Image: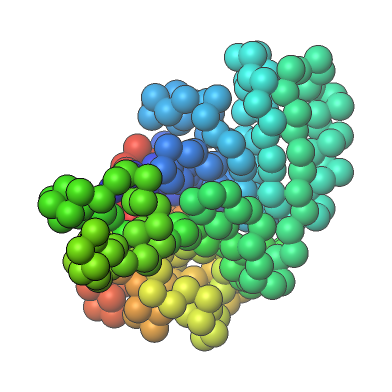
Amino acid sequence: MEPFRVHILGCGSALPTLKHFPSAQVVEVRGKLFLVDCGEGTQLQLRRTRLRFTKISAVFISHLHGDHCFGLIGMLSTFGLLGRTAKLTIYGPEALGPILQQQMNAFCHDFDYEVVFQAVDTTVQQVIYEDRSLTVETIPLEHRVPCCGFLFREKPTQPHIRRDVADFYQIPISHFNLIKAGADWTTAEGEVVPNSRLTMPAEPVRSYAYCSDTRYQPQLHQYLQGVSTLYHESTYGEDHLKNCEKYFHSTAGQAALVAREAGVGQLLLGHYSSRYEDEQVLLDEAKKVFPNTLLTNEMEVFDV
């Protein structure tokens, strides 16, 4: 099975600390790299991961708060200095477009690669990216500014040929694609070999949901049913519920409630408030609701 991983570059919230970087992570799917949010220091963190800058094919910005996008223009400049030639598409709220263009006019000249901005509607769930193996959908969130999450979902693959059976019946390789598509095989003697004997099921489809800054939404789980791995902001614990309500954030317990109602495989917590020197209190709170919960930390890599 090809890799589907999440590389955590930053999992802190707005106030800088010596422990955590602002929000940024790389989603690695079948050899492709996608950057999700780009807080300050993202390009330094990319250096530490040893992921290749040039392999990042798209950037997804959840909303226009600095801890999620202040690192973007610096990273684009570095791409140019490194001689990037491949087009880079940036997806984000509509208001990001003119800001990005102004910054590029000031700081990014004579680069050999094209930057394409694609505005997204943060209020609806829709597919904004698609290739042969993957789709990316928006997840409507509720924050103080237009904000959305992103759902990375593999496309189903075809069944696997059972080579021992295929060789026994001397089935030519030229017929394998037909069999993968569901065809049976008829021998020279007229015996029909059913497709179920010729194939093994494909690997289960994996999916990853990134829920950036948002207050608790009772309906959010409807967008996330059955995802393999959910990253959900957990800025505060229940001890600061009033701050969640004031600043449109979620507690760790609320993130766990979303995970439980959505029936996800595992929950990753992040976007911690700087007031917590030890996030174990957030983990303990979430585990009471959804046991398969993990804390994220910089440079950690999670299999989806």
**Furthest residue to the front?**
189
| Vertical side of 87 occupied by 97: above or below | below
Q: Is residue 134 visible?
A: yes
Near-viewer residue (77 or 176): 176
Side of 82 relative to 241 (left or right): right
Marker count (numbered)? 0
Residue 229: % across, % down: 36, 62
Front position in the image: 52 or 163: 163
- Residue 197 place in picture, x, y as percent: 19, 66
The residue under the point 41% across, 62% down is 181
Query: Is residue 284 shown to the viewer in this render?
Result: no
Dividing the picture into quadrants, the one containing residue 28 is top left
Which image quadrant is residue 69 in?
A: top right
Residue at 20% x, 49% y: name it. 170
State the quadrant of the C terminus: bottom left
Question: Which is nearer the eye, 33 or 158?
Answer: 158
Q: Residue at x 42, y 72 (%)?
A: 255
In this picture, is 60 found above or below 75? below
Colour scheme: rainbow
Residue 283: horizontal and vertical position, in percent? 28, 64
Question: How far across and how far down the image is residue 242, in percent?
Answer: 53, 77
- In the picture shown, does residue 42 fall above or below 167? above
Residue at 64 percent across and 14 percent down: it is 83
User: Could you tell whether 122 is left or right of 43 in the image?
Assistant: right
Q: Where 10 sits versus 214, above or below?
A: above
Q: Nearer the viewer, residue 72 or 91?
A: 91
